[in-house]
Amino acid sequence: MKRRMPMRPLVRLITLEGGPTLAIRRAAVDHRETRRLYALYHRGERAGILTVGAADELAVRLLGLHPALVWGDSWWLTGSGLSTDLPLPCRPSEQSSCGSAAQQMPSRRALQE
């Protein structure tokens, strides 16, 4: 099952930047890419949702923003960027307690339930 993000936050920010036409023309390098970005944007606009990959590409290419700045915490909770199955980096002074804390972190599946 593909993970999805709502389209509304992206549309709101792109509208503030001058609309999708202007944003896509600024981002695209050639005609083929312009058509592809238009199709990706308008498909998401019609459906009201985007796959995580499409959300990532549109946020970065059209707005120059990391997707977490567009979707906030829901970006991380979707499982798109942070893997909670891996231990987080620790400061050298916290090495003794860090390993046990990382092992107690909930898995991505537990967060989605």
Image (cartoon, rainbow, N blue to C red):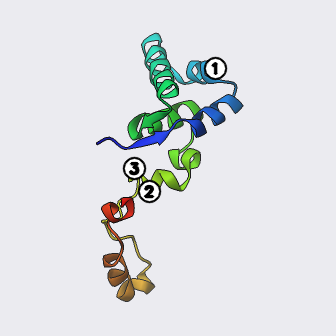
Alpha carbon distance from label 2 to label 3: 7 Å
Q: Nearer the viewer, mark 3 or mark 1?
A: 3
- Quadrant including the C terminus: bottom left
Q: Report the residue marked by disc 3.
A: 80
**Circle 3: residue type:** Ser
The crowding category of the residue bearing disc 1, from other C-alpha atoms within 10 Å (few below 14, some 14 to 19, many at least 20), is few
Residue nearer the viewer, 84 or 1: 1
- The residue lying at 50 percent from left, 18 percent from top is 38
Query: Are the two marked residues, 2 and 3, in contact with CB atoms closer than 8 angstroms?
Result: no
For label 2, the SS is helix
Residue nearer the viewer, 54 or 64: 54
Q: Furthest-bottom residue in view?
A: 96
Q: Earlier in the sequence, mark 3 or mark 1?
A: 1
Where residue 93 appears, as percent x and y from the top left, is 44, 86
- The residue lying at 59 percent from left, 22 percent from top is 26
Alpha carbon distance from label 1 to label 2: 31 Å
For label 1, the SS is helix
Q: Could you tell me if residue 27 is visible in this image? A: yes
Q: Measured along the vertical axis of the image, is residue 88 above or below residue 49?
A: below
In this rendering, position of residue 110 left or right of residue 75: left
For label 3, the SS is loop
Q: Earlier in the sequence, mark 1 or mark 2?
A: 1
Q: Furthest-front residue in view?
A: 113
Q: Report the residue marked by disc 1.
A: 22
Count of marks placed on residues: 3
Q: Nearer the viewer, mark 1 or mark 2?
A: 2
Q: Report the residue marked by disc 2.
A: 77
**Circle 1: residue type:** Leu
Where residue 102 appears, as percent x and y from the top left, is 35, 76
